């Protein structure tokens, strides 16, 4: 389904290309479609979680471009018929030379593409892409922050310094005259508004990138020992230590269950769990570390409980909405993002952050009661359909684009009528 407002904008643009305040490429004709640019830090993430949004924009008549760092998924994005522009960024670097190079790399992309709308995902594209969009005069800008992350939750001196730099850069970037910020939970909006990064009227909360309700679907529980699954980037702040401690405590109680830890450390991240320790836990039998896997839907179907004891700066944790869509109850923390997916006693349990004892009790309660797991799993699926479907997320993003294009269109029309 195509939003009629986007179709109308594209038609108006074709008839009146001067609506675009940026210089028109020399090779362009008056019938060329408006260009829409997505900027992301990971080609694989874009391919898995943003591609449906790109399809929706293309169906409306836009020429869709994607700027991502070089990676294995770049070729697959291009095979979807999207124009790909590799750019330089080191996501975890704080070296001044890397940051300047990232800005210049994006500047070249923006000059080449000349988009009518640009949509930035994640922190560095938000900061540097936002500044570049202001410099070159992109008419409309959207930013999605998928959680505030380590920069806003870390407690070290270096992290606090990085937070101050990020806040200053975001203030400059978000001063764009026609901008909307998309956040994934209300806590993040409150945080950024309190730090004067964004006015609440210029931001909207959308519950994540959505979940594929056909791919993640309910299935009967498997036979055999119960399986507790934790799948995420393996950072300390995701609650990895608490998960391992809970597994050890439950085994000491004589609980017959498997505890699966899925994912890889985010190498170079200050909160990354050392591989040597993951191997040690795996060898001891405390947990089964499976590494990175691309069969998460199947892993969830083969599990009984999903666990994410995170105190990281989450947006909307994907594993929790995937578990809900799959009809599996979750145990997570009463923290930002996590409590937006799981309601305590409804589709899972919420425990205090960093409290492995409470985590043990919550997991044990679910392992002891198949009927409770079934009831909570059904509620999770209902909530996923009502609140977290991918189509719903795509439509909410399109609504944001329409609001900016309409505002820009009216502004351009008033300017054209002025004496």
Image (cartoon, rainbow, N blue to C red):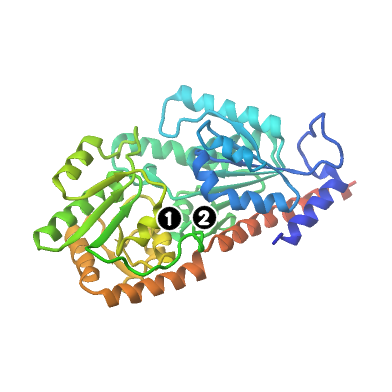
- Where residue 388 sits in the image (x, y, percent)? 50, 64
Query: Residue at the spot x=41%, y=51% of the render?
Result: 295
> Looking at the figure, which quarter contains the N terminus?
bottom right
Q: Is residue 231 above or below residue 108?
A: below
Q: Residues within 10 Å of mark 1 (few under 14, many from 20)?
A: some
Residue 413 seen in this snapshot: no
Label 1 – label 2 distance at C-alpha = 8 Å
Residue 304 seen in this snapshot: yes
Between 291 and 148, the one nearer to me in the picture: 291
Query: Residue at the spot x=46%, y=30% of the render?
Result: 90
Q: Is residue 293 above or below residue 367?
A: above
* 288 sits left or right of 165 in the view: left
- Where residue 33 sits in the image (x, y, percent)? 79, 44
- Where residue 179 sits in the image (x, y, percent)? 63, 48
Label 1 vs 2, first from the N-terminus: 2
- The residue wearing badge 2 is 209
- Where residue 76 sits in the image (x, y, percent)? 57, 39
Q: Is the residue under label 2 in contact with that under label 1 (CB below 8 Å)? A: yes
Which residue occupies the extreme front position in the image?
Answer: 223
| The quadrant where residue 106 appears | top right
Which residue occupies the extreme top position in the image?
Answer: 97
- The residue wearing badge 1 is 318
């Amino acid at each position: 389904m195509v939003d009629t407002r986007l179709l109308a904008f594209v038609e108006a643009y074709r008839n009146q290309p001067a609506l675009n305040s940026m210089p028109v490429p020399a090779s362009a004709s008056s019938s060329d479609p408006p260009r829409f640019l997505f900027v992301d830090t990971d080609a694989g993430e874009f391919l898995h979680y943003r591609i449906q949004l790109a399809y929706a924009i293309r169906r409306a008549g836009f020429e869709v471009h994607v700027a991502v760092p070089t990676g294995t998924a770049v070729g697959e994005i291009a095979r979807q018929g999207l124009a790909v522009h590799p750019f330089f960024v080191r996501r975890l670097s704080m070296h001044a030379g890397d940051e300047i190079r990232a800005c210049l790399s994006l500047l070249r992309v923006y000059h080449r593409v000349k988009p009518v709308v640009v949509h930035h995902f994640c922190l560095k594209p938000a900061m540097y892409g936002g500044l570049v969009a202001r410099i070159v005069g992109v008419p409309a800008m959207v930013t999605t922050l998928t959680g505030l992350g380590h920069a806003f939750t870390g407690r070290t001196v270096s992290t606090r310094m990085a937070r101050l730099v990020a806040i200053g850069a975001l203030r400059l970037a978000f001063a764009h005259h026609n901008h909307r910020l998309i956040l994934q939970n209300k806590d993040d909006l409150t945080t950024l508004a309190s730090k004067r990064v964004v006015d609440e009227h210029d931001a909207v909360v959308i519950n994540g990138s959505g979940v594929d309700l056909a791919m993640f679907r309910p299935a009967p529980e498997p036979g055999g020992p119960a399986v507790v699954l934790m799948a995420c980037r393996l950072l300390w702040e995701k609650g990895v230590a608490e998960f391992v401690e809970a597994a050890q405590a439950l085994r000491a109680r004589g609980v017959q269950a498997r505890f699966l830890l899925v994912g890889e450390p985010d190498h170079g991240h200050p909160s990354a769990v050392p591989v040597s320790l993951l191997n040690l836990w795996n060898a001891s039998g405390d947990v089964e570390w499976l590494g990175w896997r691309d069969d998460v839907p199947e892993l969830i179907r083969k599990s009984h409980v999903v666990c994410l004891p995170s105190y990281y700066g989450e947006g909307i944790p994907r594993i929790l909405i995937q578990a809900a869509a799959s009809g599996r109850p979750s145990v997570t923390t009463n923290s930002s993002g996590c409590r937006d997916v799981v309601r305590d006693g409804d589709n899972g349990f919420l425990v205090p952050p960093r409290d492995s004892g409470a985590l043990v009790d919550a997991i044990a309660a679910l392992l002891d009661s198949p009927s409770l797991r079934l009831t909570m799993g059904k509620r999770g699926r209902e909530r996923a359909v009502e609140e977290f479907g991918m189509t719903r997320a795509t439509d909410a993003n399109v609504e944001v684009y329409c609001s900016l294009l309409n505002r820009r269109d009216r502004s351009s029309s008033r300017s054209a009528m002025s004496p």
